[in-house]
Image: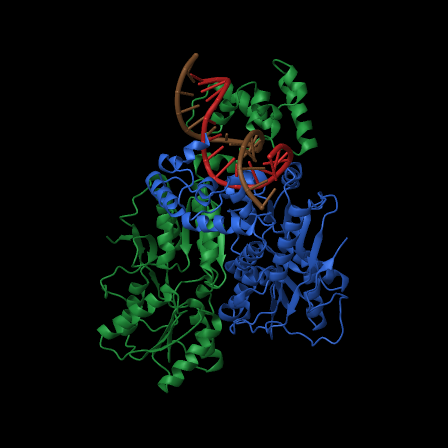
Chain colours: A blue, B green, C brown, D red
Amino acid sequence: MRASHLNNETMTKPKPCVEAAALAHKAVIAREARRVTSYDVALVAGVSQSAVSRCFQAGASVSETTLARVMKAAGLLDYIPNAAARSLITRRSNIVAVLIASQANLHYPELLGELSQQMGARGKRVLLFMLPRETDVERVLSEVWQYQVDGVIAAAHLSSGHIAEFERRQMPLVLFNRTVRERPVHTVTCDHREAGRMLVSRLAAAGHRRFGIIAGLEDSTVANERRRGACERLAELGLPPPVVVPGQSDYPSGAAGLRAIISAMGAVPDAIICGSDVMAIGCLDCARHELGIDVPRQLSVAGFDAVEPSNWLSYNLTTLRQPMPRMAQAAAELLCAVIDNNHPAATPDRRVFSAQFIEGATARLEPVFSTITGATPGLAAPVAIM
Amino acid sequence: MRASHLNNETMTKPKPCVEAAALAHKAVIAREARRVTSYDVALVAGVSQSAVSRCFQAGASVSETTLARVMKAAGLLDYIPNAAARSLITRRSNIVAVLIASQANLHYPELLGELSQQMGARGKRVLLFMLPRETDVERVLSEVWQYQVDGVIAAAHLSSGHIAEFERRQMPLVLFNRTVRERPVHTVTCDHREAGRMLVSRLAAAGHRRFGIIAGLEDSTVANERRRGACERLAELGLPPPVVVPGQSDYPSGAAGLRAIISAMGAVPDAIICGSDVMAIGCLDCARHELGIDVPRQLSVAGFDAVEPSNWLSYNLTTLRQPMPRMAQAAAELLCAVIDNNHPAATPDRRVFSAQFIEGATARLEPVFSTITGATPGLAAPVAIM
DNA sequence: TTGTATGCGTTATCAC
DNA sequence: GTGATAACGCATACAA
């Protein structure tokens, strides 16, 4: 059975010369395009297959000499362990799936890069699942199951039914910037509601009274939470309810939203809060270049996310930054903990970070002397809830 | 041996009731956290394991009734084939690696999204390998070999030694926007040199004479080709050699480059060509907001890539767009062809696309009546070279 | 520490 | 069309 691994030449020799055997094997490999296996290495090194296997494991007990011989043979043969075979027996693929809704969100690349790096540092790789338009999650999930990934980080909308399937399959899951009330699930989020509140507080303190809000996509938890926080805080402060118009989280939505708000109010509002920076920039450009509105003198515009362009001189946007690197790190850390410790899913870890206020220059703001809302602006420290 | 798959209860029954068997199995699974295998499904469906396997293959010959019974049992048990086991025998993981240099390039997300989608349509998934700063490619490659990916798309710098290793391992490879002269390798590129030439032609036709160039990263083939094309064309037209300053392909480099060029020339040039849009935007912002230079009246600024912000009202940048979706599709197509047909690597496929000129409003341009360079501007049709 | 034997879950082969 | 059986390449329990 395993004899098929050995060719006749090397079989006849009782203790084959290392070099010759290596050459013979290389020839065989070149001819048959067969993969180099641990058996080949074992043969060349003159040890057993299990010895070779042990040499490629972390805390295995192998003698110095064996290790040296095996490594030499492995180098000679260009041997690399086969992860598929390994994962079959260890039940660990060292692959995590990242589900990401491909809404043109400019900070997803940052998230992806950070996640990839953080996972790489933990010996895992990212298998990418881009969800075109939040559609057929079913099919994508069934693919996820097939690939035997060790866990999933989801930055896309999952129904509680989907999440239940994760539980049934005991598949570690961390939601990124999404929450689900119905199910106990690990999450890493930014407190977008608090961010919305903070923004309104700062704007209200500077005298803004009539607000417009350009909402994000309907199914975006992030955008909804931001809007909710803003509206909530406006009500608390006794300010008139804002004019809320829908948006698609893209550049054109900013301009369209601005026009819609002005049309609905019959006037330019004091401030417009946009569900994302890209919309804020669209709003800003429309106000300045098309409507001739002086921002921030006549109108304050604020966004969320602190994407790279928001910091460019032409914009210098008032916005709030999510601490992406730390959030990505937290997600990677949490997922790996669940994978390794079999962390009990009964007590979900909900790691919440707070957004950092970026003053920018597109909103009239008062300098801050004391904390207004009770939240800690500026520093985005992780806050453990429950 | 395989008896370990069957528990005693169901073993004793000659033809177990489907429902009961399913329940029994579910219980076993819940207790032991054992995976559902094709044997379990076979048992419940009352067929052999091979039959189950065939039901999950494309062109297998299975009778209607068998298929129905198997699928019902599979649904009952939540059975999903194990891709690791499958790939072990088929030598096909249905995973392709994408190597991508994580330079903050705003159009990489677009590339990644397109690739992921194109691959998904071909039944393959993307395993992501972000290379922090073009460093230790060795280690990353050894990971790539481990994961038994079916092929690799590399949008990062690979030495010819690395590429030789792909050949040795017979690992399908498609380079994206990179070329290597020394080795026969499949590539999908945009003709950046031609793009540089085209840009200079258009600017020269409009009367620009004194050029500045802000180069991209030293090791970036793309930026180098653009610069080369531009310089080449300037020489052909008998214009004075441009002042070339280095850049990092980021926003600050644009401003720094502008200052450096002005300082080196002792004057504001007629036009500045930037190796990327982000630098062009940095240059533009610095010119307008810091130096009070009127763009495009006093100075023309042009970039490359047509990233999303280049189209925003505040910029409306003169630039050239790579046909990313089609390039990604070509890369996916080519790689899959190599994977499936065992496409002979001796005749490398080099698919070249041409960039589309975006007039924008940051450069003074003459309207085009006839083609200047001989290339076809506007439409980016694939051009087969060799 | 080392070698032997076995199993991980699937596909492939070949009789039937 | 269907079922037994042998791989695929590795890790691991167990004996030595």
Q: Residue furthest bottom?
A: B266
Q: Inspect this view and state whether residue A138 appears.
A: no
- Counting from the top left corner in percent of width and height, residue B240 is at 27, 80
Q: Is residue D12 left or right of residue A36?
A: right
Q: Is residue A244 left or right of residue A46?
A: right
Q: In the rendered view, would you say A109 is above or below B344? A: below
Of B208 and A247, the residue lying toward us? B208
Q: Is residue A244 left or right of residue A120?
A: right
- Counting from the top left corner in percent of width and height, residue A118 is at 58, 57
- Counting from the top left corner in percent of width and height, residue B53 is at 49, 27
Q: Inspect this view and state whether residue A117 appears.
A: yes
Count of labels in the image = 0
Of B148 and B77, the residue lying toward us? B148
Q: In the rendered view, would you say A258 is above or below A57? A: below
In which quarter of the view is residue B47 placed? top right
Of A294 and A130, the residue lying toward us? A130
User: Residue drawn 31% across and 43% down?
Assistant: B343
In which quarter of the view is residue B201 placed? bottom left
User: Residue drawn 43% across and 22% down?
Assistant: B61
- Counting from the top left corner in percent of width and height, residue A294 is at 56, 74
In which quarter of the view is residue B40 placed? top right
User: Residue drawn 56% across and 18% down?
Assistant: B46
Q: In the rendered view, would you say B252 is above or below B265? A: above
Of A53 and A257, the residue lying toward us? A53
Q: Quadrant of the N terminus of chain B?
A: top right
